[in-house]
Image (cartoon, rainbow, N blue to C red):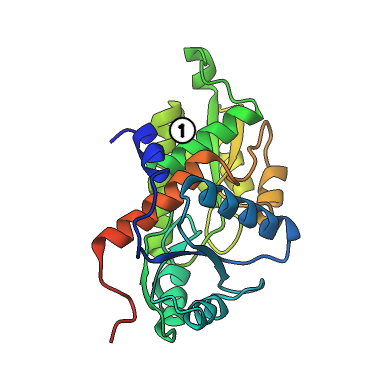
């Protein structure tokens, strides 16, 4: 299925009785993150009229996921699909979200995180182009260009595996080396990856921001860019399509994370 077809599917109407969509964000002390996530949810509502869309956080911001699920129960909602606004597997997807959902009276199922996926790569490419990446490079330009894919970082090996997969998909799309690097916890760091690429003769190194919203990690990663740095993924239409695609996948699978 083409990526344009996936985005078109995102715009279909939700059948009566379909579960609510709860987008699960990590949470951030940066107020720009919360405003970006809220704007993204508004775009989701525009694309899927009639779908109840809610927000819950793992930490740092309100509403917390547990409070969102309790509110749904109080309003008589019986089913919900939880879509992690996270770009790879890891502890939050594997443990935190299922444990928070397990205590809810609402029946829930947890969707896959947003990455890796071609729609995520669509967004990364679009943000790089906005920052000045030339999509029609000459062969000589490609030989001196590269990208550092800046991600949050995790000790979970599944998270690193997913980020590497996203980097490979992005490299295939751009036709240049793409090296995953991390803002915390994992190695290499973004500055280390930049230095390694430049030592290999890649003088034009861009940093692709693999973060959903502005914040400290995105800012620090961008500051390490010797050339251009893309903006966070934000409210790009492909992100809207990807959120709804994950919702539809989980809804089609049936079952529930906290069924008796």
Above or below, 84 against 115 in this view is below
Looking at this view, is 98 or 16 the one in front?
16
Taking the spot 69% from the left edge, 34% from the top edge, the residue there is: 226
Looking at the image, can residue 142 be seen? yes
Name the quarter where the N terminus is drawn. top left
Looking at this view, is 68 or 34 the one in front?
68
Above or below, 252 against 127 in this view is below
Q: Is residue 173 left or right of residue 149?
A: left
Residue 248 x, y percent position in the rendering: 34, 55
Residue 164 x, y percent position in the rendering: 41, 48
Looking at the image, can residue 199 be seen? no
Taking the spot 53% from the left edge, 59% from the top edge, the residue there is: 153
Taking the spot 45% from the left edge, 58% from the top edge, the residue there is: 51
Q: Is residue 4 left or right of residue 35?
A: left
Residue at the extreme front of the image, as rendered: 16
Q: How many marks?
A: 1
Above or below, 13 against 135 in this view is below
Which image quadrant for residue 184?
A: bottom right
Residue bearing the label numbered 1: 177
Looking at this view, is 108 or 164 the one in front?
108
Above or below, 36 against 225 in this view is below
The kind of secondary structure element at disc 1 is loop
Residue 113 x, y percent position in the rendering: 42, 58
Residue 131 x, y percent position in the rendering: 65, 30
Mark 1 residue crowding within 10 angstroms, few (<14) / some (14–19) / many (20+): many
Taking the spot 45% from the left edge, 52% from the top edge, the residue there is: 243
């Amino acid at each position: 299925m083409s990526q344009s077809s996936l985005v078109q599917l995102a715009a279909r109407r939700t059948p009566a009785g379909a579960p609510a969509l709860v987008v699960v964000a990590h949470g951030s002390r940066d107020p720009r993150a919360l405003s970006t996530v809220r704007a993204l949810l508004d775009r989701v509502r525009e694309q899927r009229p009639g779908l109840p869309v809610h927000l819950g956080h793992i930490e740092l911001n309100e509403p917390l996921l547990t409070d969102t699920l309790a509110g749904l129960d109080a309003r008589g909602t019986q089913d919900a699909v939880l879509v992690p606004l996270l770009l790879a597997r890891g502890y939050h997807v594997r443990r935190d979200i299922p444990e928070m959902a397990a205590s809810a009276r609402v029946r829930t199922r947890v969707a896959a995180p947003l990455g890796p996926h071609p729609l995520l790569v669509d967004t990364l490419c679009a943000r790089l182009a906005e920052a000045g990446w030339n999509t029609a490079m000459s062969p000589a330009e490609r030989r001196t260009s590269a990208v550092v894919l800046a991600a949050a970082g995790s000790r979970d090996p599944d998270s690193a595996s997913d980020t590497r997969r996203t980097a490979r998909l992005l490299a295939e799309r751009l036709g240049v080396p793409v090296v995953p690097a991390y803002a915390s916890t994992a190695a290499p760091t973004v500055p280390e990856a930049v230095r390694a690429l430049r030592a290999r003769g890649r003088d034009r190194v861009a940093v692709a921001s693999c973060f959903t919203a502005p914040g400290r990690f995105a800012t620090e990663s961008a500051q390490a860019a010797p050339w251009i740095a893309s903006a966070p993924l934000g409210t790009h239409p492909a992100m809207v399509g990807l959120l709804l695609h994950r919702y539809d996948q989980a809804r089609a699978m049936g079952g529930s994370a906290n069924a008796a």
